[in-house]
Amino acid sequence: MPLLEDPFSTDFMQRALLGGSLVAVICGAVGTWVVIRGMAFLGEAIGHGMLPGVAVATLVGAPVLVGGAASAVVMSATIGALHRRGRMSYDTAIGLLFVGMLSLGVIIVSHSGSFATDATVMLFGDVLALRDGDLALLALAAVATLVVTAVFHRAFVAAAFDPRVARTLGLRPGLAQAVLVGLVTVAVVASYQAVGSLLVVGLLLAPAVAAGQWTTRIPTTMALAALVGVLAVLTGLLVSWHAGTAAGSSIAYTAVVLAALSAVVRRLTPGPRRPAPAH
């Protein structure tokens, strides 16, 4: 079918599809836990927390992912430090750093002669510009994410549903929380090139929400979320090609639409309502 074959006859669209699919796998695994733990605001905050590092890297000619990753790590560590010391609530710390890091990023970028272009790429990504090196990094991030989620699965489950039991079993819920925040950071940084800091939560949440309508087991939810994410990437790229829309925005919007459609179809489907996720 020319409608499907023509767009992906080009190298840059093939790289966009492969890179976007790797991002979908990462976000499917991490996003499932983000939804279960109610950490959506953290993902959004880390996405914007990348901006100062990305802005500095852009101005000095350094790799933007390195700058973004460093900034995101600083953001995550500062949130954790403020919360552990009891000086403010988790949400308050996230909210203040969210605004502060976003403002700092815009201030830094405003000194660039290409402010509009830089800001657009930072906020909305450029999945069509993925290179072979970017794909290799995404593949490495995907493998690392899957390995970590498998190793810490029991700890994540116990910490999510009963931290006291987790401590009794020696599963260290504090460490599990720190690792989970680290995974959210990896997912946000990995997704940056594809959809930018503003839309990253769309891929992080929407596929997991869509998958959660149909399955009660966490590993199955992750797998289904990854498939929904890949479908969103494929559909979004096709829409972008034929309609001339921004690729990253098309992918993120498609993911949200799929989540909405999943909820509607699930409500219309006979059968018992989905219970809480099981491990």
Image: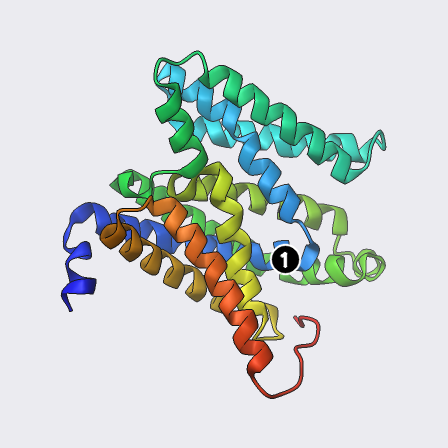
Badge 1: residue crowd in 10 Å (few <14, some 14–19, many ≥20): some
Residue under the image location 17 percent in, 48 percent down:
11
Percent x, y of residue 183: 57, 47
Q: Answer whether residue 219 is visible to the viewer in this image.
A: no
Place of residue 12 in the rendered image (x, y in percent of width and height, measured from the top left)? 21, 45
**What residue is rendered at 79% in x and 59% in y?**
166
User: Between residues 138 and 107, which one lies in front from this camera angle?
Assistant: 107
Q: Position of residue 209 (x, y in %)?
A: 57, 63
Check the image and tell me how it is coloured: rainbow
x 42%, y 57%: residue: 254
- In front of the other: 176 or 49: 49
Give the labeled residue for mark 1.
35
Q: Can residue 61 be seen?
A: yes
Q: Establish if 78 lies above or below 222.
A: above
**Measured along the vertical axis of the image, is residue 32 above or below residue 277?**
above
Indicate whether 131 appears above or below 228: above
Q: Amino acid at mark 1?
A: Val
Task: Assign a secondary structure to mark 1.
Answer: helix
Say above or below: 71 vs 146.
above
Residue in the image at 38% along x and 45% along y? 248
Q: Name the spot of residue 102 as percent of width and height, x first.
A: 57, 27
Q: Count the labels in the image.
A: 1
The quadrant of the image that shows the N terminus is bottom left
State left or right for residue 219 relative to residue 159: left
Q: Looking at the rendering, in which quadrant would you find the C terminus?
A: bottom right
Q: Which residue is nearer to you in this view: 62 or 112?
A: 112
Q: Residue furthest bottom?
A: 270
Q: Residue furthest front?
A: 243
Quadrant for residue 57, please give it. Answer: top left
